Image (spheres, rainbow, N blue to C red):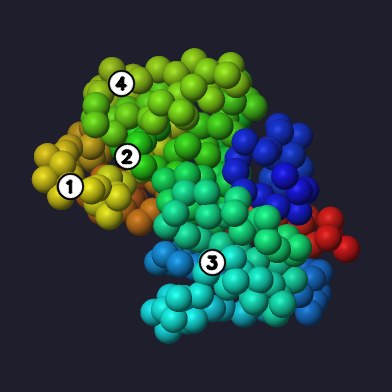
Amino acid sequence: MRDDQLLTAKQLSREDIEDILDRAAEFDADPAAFGDRREDAILGLCFFEPSTRTKMSFETAIKRLGGDTVDMGPVDSSSVKKGESLADTARVVEGYADALVLRHPSQGAAKMVGEFVDVPLLNAGDGAGHHPTQTLLDLYTIRENAGLDDLTIGIMGDLKYGRTVHSLAHALTNFDADQHFVSPESLKLPRSVRYDLHEEGAMVREHTELDDILPSLDVLYVTRIQRERFPDENEYQEIAGEYGIDLETLEAAKDDLTVMHPLPRVDEIAPEVDDTDYATYFEQAHNGVPVRMALLDQLLEEDE
């Protein structure tokens, strides 16, 4: 895999992660100071799935660095509607841009596109596969609030289809972090992810009840039950709303617990939690800009 492509969190070593997070901290301290850093750079945005935070934070990041974007726009108004292949779309946009960001509903789409393009490529989510740039901003947020070593983290929700979970779990194997996975039986981690985590030396501890481990957690990472990923609506309805937290739930937590969520949320975290010191999910979303500034800056630098 090329150095100017980030397709999966498995690519990232501890040193890689720390380099990006350190660079992100510099941008975060004074983002306006880097307005000519990547002047004239054009970022191509190829989003085949809806996105708010990821897309807007990439747009903001490149503009903060002095660059701009070209956007293929909604799939329904693009040449994809006429039957153009993903590889051809990527090669066309590559001709207009210095780097590409791809989100696609099919697992493995970014890897396939990576074989066709020569400019830096970032995977912004491929189906239930990977979301490595989300993982970097998650790690940045965890480091800022709880540190990345001597950490006990609970990851709760849709662990089967949750690409943010898969990427974060892989990345955390680089650190001294105990990982606990909380989900209904039907949404447990895929066997392939469990196997990879075991191979990377992680202890996979799985639970169906948050109460079993909540008092020991430094970080609780909550994810949405993704209705759109379920092949059977009845299966979704059976578990919808079961894995939520509110102030009563958090009475058993440490006072300095950090509660995270990649957003959007539906009913996993009650709004009453927003105004507490536990809530870190909006800070987490904000961190997408400096982290993606750092990543874009690094990949464009390597491509020079």
Q: Which residue is mark 4?
A: 207
- What secondary structure is marked by label 3? helix
Earlier sequence position, callout 3 versus callout 4:
3
Q: How many marks?
A: 4
Q: Could you tell me the amino acid type at mark 4?
A: His
Location of the N terminus (image quadrant):
top right
Earlier sequence position, callout 3 versus callout 2:
3
Q: Which residue is mark 2?
A: 158
Question: Is residue 137 visible from the viewing direction of this image?
Answer: no
Q: Are marks 1 and 2 in contact (CB under 8 Å)?
A: no
In this rendering, the label closer to the viewer, 3 or 2: 3
Residue at (36%, 42%) from the top-left corner?
161
Q: Could you tell me the amino acid type at mark 2?
A: Asp
> Residue 147 sits in which quadrant?
top right
Residue at (42%, 57%) from the top-left corner?
105
- On the image, the x and y values in percent for residue 185 come to 24, 26
Location of the C terminus (image quadrant):
bottom right
Q: CA distance from mark 4 to mark 1?
A: 24 Å
- On the image, the x and y values in percent for residue 199 come to 57, 19
- Residue 86 marker: 3
- What secondary structure is marked by label 1? loop
Q: CA distance from mark 1 to mark 2?
A: 15 Å
Q: Which residue is mark 1?
A: 232
In this rendering, the label closer to the viewer, 3 or 4: 3
In this rendering, the label closer to the viewer, 4 or 1: 1
Taking 200 as reference, is 280 above or below it? below
Residue at (83%, 60%) from the top-left corner?
303
Q: CA distance from mark 3 to mark 4?
A: 39 Å
Taking 180 as reference, is 110 above or below it? below
